Image (cartoon, grey):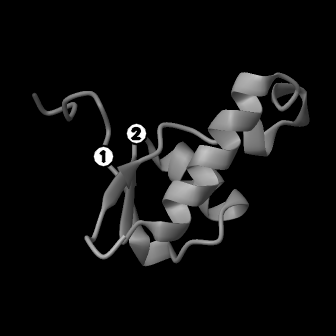
Amino acid sequence: SAVPAVVTVHDVIPLALADYRRGPLQRAYTSLVRAASASACHLITDSEFSRTDILKHLPVRPEAVTAIPLAANARF
């Protein structure tokens, strides 16, 4: 796309664990995540753990992936 896109990737479990790649929905999810991450200018995810998995399993630059936790900071 000519329009820069930011994509949210909640997790890459089907990429990380072979047991989760068996069904058609998991294969479709994997294909969509790969295609979206390849064309996105930035990815956001829910946790540092997911960020680490994304960097391990997708060909994206570390500076192009940001973890934004879903819960409020402990100080709140």
Q: Judging from the image, what secondary structure is the residue with disc 1 in?
A: loop
Task: Determine the CA span between mark 2 and mark 1.
Answer: 5 Å
- Along the viewing direction, whichever of 11 and 37 lies nearer the viewer: 37
| Residue 13 in sight | no
Q: Residue at x 48, y 37 (%)?
A: 10
Q: Judging from the image, what secondary structure is the residue with disc 2 in?
A: loop
Residues under numbered marks 2 and 1 in contact, where contact means CB atoms less than 8 Å apart: yes
- Along the viewing direction, whichever of 64 and 31 lies nearer the viewer: 31
Residue 16 spot, x, y in % from top left: 77, 43
Q: Which residue is drawn at 20% across and 35% down?
A: 73
Residue type of the residue flagged with mark 1: Ile
Residue type of the residue flagged with mark 2: Asp
Q: Does 3 sit above or below residue 33?
A: below
Residue hosting label 2: 46
Mark before the other along the chain sequence, 2 or 1: 2
Q: Does 51 sit above or below residue 12?
A: below
Residue hosting label 1: 68
Residue 25 spot, x, y in % from top left: 70, 24
Residue 47 spot, x, y in % from top left: 44, 42
Q: In which quarter of the image is the N terminus?
A: bottom left
- Please tell me in which quadrant of the rendered image residue 74 appears: top left
Q: In this view, does 62 lie to the left or right of 42?
A: right
